[in-house]
Amino acid sequence: MKAIVCGSCVVDLPCLTVDLSNPIGPDRIQPIEPIQPTGGGITCNVGFALQRLGIVTGVMTYVGDDRWGIILREQMVEEGLNTAMLYTHPSDPTTAVVALVDEQGARSFLAPGVKTATKSINAAFIRRDLPVIAQASYFILGYFGRMPALERDLPEVLQEIRATGCRTVMDSAGDGGNPERLQRILPHLDIYVPSEHEARRQTKESDPKSMLAHLRQWNPHGILGIKLGAHGAILESPDQGLVELPALDPGAPVVDTTGAGDCFLAGLIAGLDQRLPLAEAGRWAAAAGAAAVTQRGGHAGVRSLEQIQGLLD
């Protein structure tokens, strides 16, 4: 395995299309397209995209002892992911999320309000497979802000992983998590590219370049960036400086923006693994993010390296 993706593992139930401007209301039927359960969360979105882009990838996470867990395991095997570190939690259920998607691809989520299997991921869970992680090139973790049992110990865990020579990557979600806790984690990351919304909450800054400068206080060595959605992204590294990336035209209608940020991250890692300069690896990231929005779900739009090269050409 060249990459190991750890953390959020979700069955996504995308509902297209839903008018998000109006309340659903009681005793009403709203027509949608047929629901097709698909793997989601960082393990599936980044994991599937990396595998399709030629990076041999494994997953490290929990699923529940239930039908949703079986579906996720089957999909991961079909995609060719290494599932040796996909564990079944004895009591907590698999996370299942309903994604309500409108005609423009914007979405709203119905998520469990109870503890699910991935919430049990903690430092001991990761450390027991540290010898396996040590053989990989990238350890990708997500999502910061949604790992309650792990985040206090993350600085030490990530430091141990980096000491093996494996590069550490983290993604965030939701409200961006606890800024003070993030400051302790940042020194131990090699790649961190939150969304503009998350970075605004984490840094209290409104300008993306100011957000980068704020994050750089605690991370002098890594690749940092801000994903700007339809406005592209910015990336920065100490040796290559600031790179501004415009959004790429996906060449097809926008269907669902779920997972676009995860696929951006997968494209970036795939480009860096080819030893491309940051600007060119960033273009791979932009292309993967653009491809992601053309299909329902968080990863179906990213199909192959040839597809990404076609978008770039």
Image (cartoon, grey):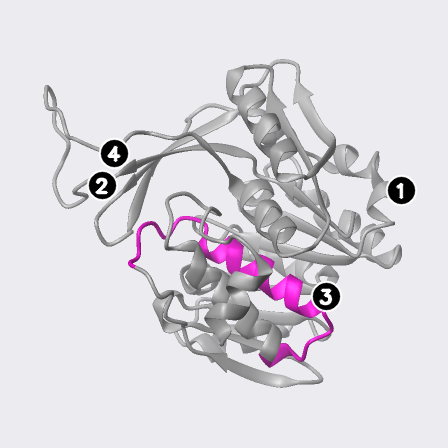
Point 56% across, 69% down: residue: 284
The magenta stretch spans residue 277: yes
Q: Amino acid at mark 1?
A: Pro
Decide: is 216 above or below 101.
below
Mark 1, residue position: 131
10 Å crowding of disc 4: few (<14), some (14-19), many (20+): few
Q: Which residue is mark 3?
A: 273
Relative placement, left or right, of 275 versus 231 is: right
Establish if 176 lies above or below 78: below
- Residue 181 in view, yes or no: no
Of the pair 111 and 178, the residue shown nearer to us:
111
User: Residue at position x 67%, y 62% from top?
Assistant: 186
Tell me, yes or no, whether the highlighted magenta stretch contains residue 70. Answer: no
Q: Is residue 86 above or below residue 247?
A: above
Name which residue type carries label 3. Asp
Which label lies toward us, 3 or 4? Answer: 4
- The disc, 1 or 2, on the residue closer to the chain's N-terminal end is 2
Q: Secondary structure at mark 2?
A: loop
Residue 17 shows which numbered tag?
2
For the residues bearing labels 3 and 4, Cβ distance under 8 angstroms: no
Q: Residues within 10 Å of mark 3 (few under 14, many from 20)?
A: some
Q: Which residue is labeled 4 in the image?
A: 33
Q: Is residue 156 above or below residue 236?
A: above
User: What separation in Å lies between label 3 and label 4 (alpha carbons)?
Assistant: 38 Å
Query: What is the C-alpha distance between the residues marked 3 and 2?
Result: 37 Å
Mark nearer the N terminus (3 vs 1): 1
